Image: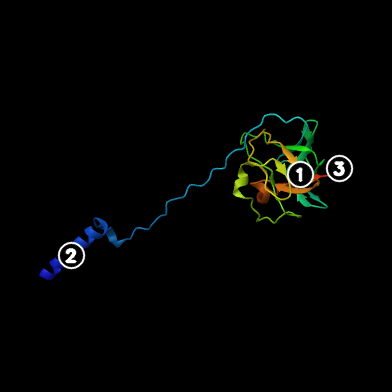
Amino acid sequence: MRALQLASVLAAAACFIAVDGCAHLTNGSVPSVTPTPTPSATPLSAACNQTAAANAQIVAISPLITPVIDPTYGLISGYGLATTGSSSNVAATIVVAPTAAVQFFNNDQSTSQLRYSAVGIPGVTTFPGPTFTFPPSTVTQTGTQINATSSWSTGLLPGQCYSQVFTISAAGVYFFGDYTYYALGNIRDVIVATSSPGL
């Protein structure tokens, strides 16, 4: 009996020394450890420009722009070059002069205020597969030059807002797509910067 009492005293002392007290669990259950949730980054909206820049070529972004299969670039959708205040409701390659200034416009007029974007895909000659994801940094406005070697992005544009103004580095073909809906809705297109007006 004395040995049993001594064992109890030693066990109690061990609890106080090791963890400043012992917890008594009911029903012999062991609590599961739940990791503390890590805060997820909240996508930031891009700055909302209310007006188009003078002499900028405006590219409208809308999921209502019908997709097409371009014979050269494959499936394109969601973007259309706007002229005289309106844009086509059918996707087409965005053909501009190599010296053009380009601005993107989120044409969403719904109350949901869905945010759309245009993000460059540098270093490619065809669209990446559906598992492609953009660098996290391009969720916000990135850069002001459209080129083939570095990232550029409008950021997530609120509805009825214009992006920053982009310049084009040289004649060429520049692949781009929507940060969120590239894989989900195939919203993607190409800018063809050329001095040949027939293209």
At a point 57% along the width and 40% down the height, the residue shown is 44
Mark 3: which amino acid?
A: Ser
Check disc 1 and report its element: helix, strand or loop. Answer: loop
Q: Which label lies toward us, 3 or 1? A: 1
- Residue 16 is at least partly visible in this image: yes
Q: Pick whichever, 71 or 15, lies toward us.
A: 15
Residue 169 is labelled as 1
User: Which residue is labeled 3 in the image?
Assistant: 195
Dot 3 or dot 2, earlier in sequence: 2
Does 74 sit above or below residue 110?
A: below
- Residue 1 is at least partly visible in this image: no
Dot 2 or dot 1, earlier in sequence: 2
Quadrant in which residue 157 is drawn: top right
User: Which residue is labeled 2 in the image?
Assistant: 10
Check disc 2 and report its element: helix, strand or loop. Answer: helix
Check disc 3 and report its element: helix, strand or loop. Answer: loop
Mark 1: which amino acid?
A: Ser
At a point 71% along the width and 42% down the height, the residue shown is 145
- Give me the C-alpha separation between circle 3 and circle 2: 89 Å
- Give me the C-alpha separation between circle 3 and circle 1: 13 Å
Q: Residues within 10 Å of mark 2 (few under 14, many from 20)?
A: few
Q: Which label lies toward us, 2 or 1? A: 1
Mark 2: which amino acid?
A: Leu
x%, y% of residue 109?
A: 67, 33
For the C terminus, give its image quadrant: top right
Quadrant in which residue 166 is drawn: top right
